[in-house]
Image: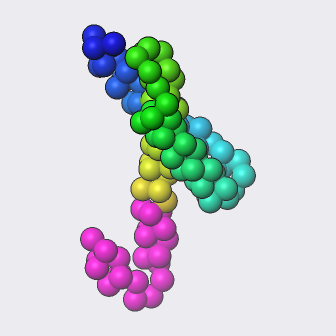
Amino acid sequence: MGDQKGYISVMFDIGAVIGAILVGYLADRFNKRALVLTPSLLLSAVVMFMVSFALGDTPWPYYMLLLLLGTFISGPYNMIGTLIAIDIGNNIKEKGSVAKVSSLI
């Protein structure tokens, strides 16, 4: 399994791309952010537990679990960062909110 560590770590990045697309699509489809973010983050905790404790020496479960982990962690991560920027941009239009936005930066 030592020669496959690099390939296993790349699976997280592939899952991140899949997760960003999937979570963004589902959030737009259902128009509810928390409906998509909460289950995804809870599933990531389950997958992290499985990676930590429930695997042996065969590499293929690591491939699949790190793909899922990248999907469940990076999808919400990308969505939260984007939504913060959108919400700050929408709040600038309100009176007196420029000081609030500049204090965040």
Q: Residue furthest right?
A: 30
- Image label count: 0
In the displayed structure, would residue 22 be above or below residue 102?
Answer: above
* Rendered residue at 29%/19% (across/down): 6
Quarter that holds the N terminus:
top left
Q: Which residues are magenta?
A: 84-105
Quarter that holds the C terminus:
bottom left
* Rendered residue at 40%/17% (across/down): 57
- Left or right: 35 as drawn, with respect to 3: right
* Rendered residue at 50%/20% (across/down): 61
| Residue 95 rendering spot, x and y as whole percentages | 45, 88
- Left or right: 74 as drawn, with respect to 23: left
Question: Who is closer to the viewer here, 50 or 101?
Answer: 50
| Residue 44 rendering spot, x and y as whole percentages | 52, 43
Question: Who is closer to the viewer here, 11 or 98?
Answer: 11
Question: Who is closer to the viewer here, 16 or 48?
Answer: 48
Examine the residues drawn in magenta and state their main secondary structure.
helix
Question: Who is closer to the viewer here, 89 or 104?
Answer: 104
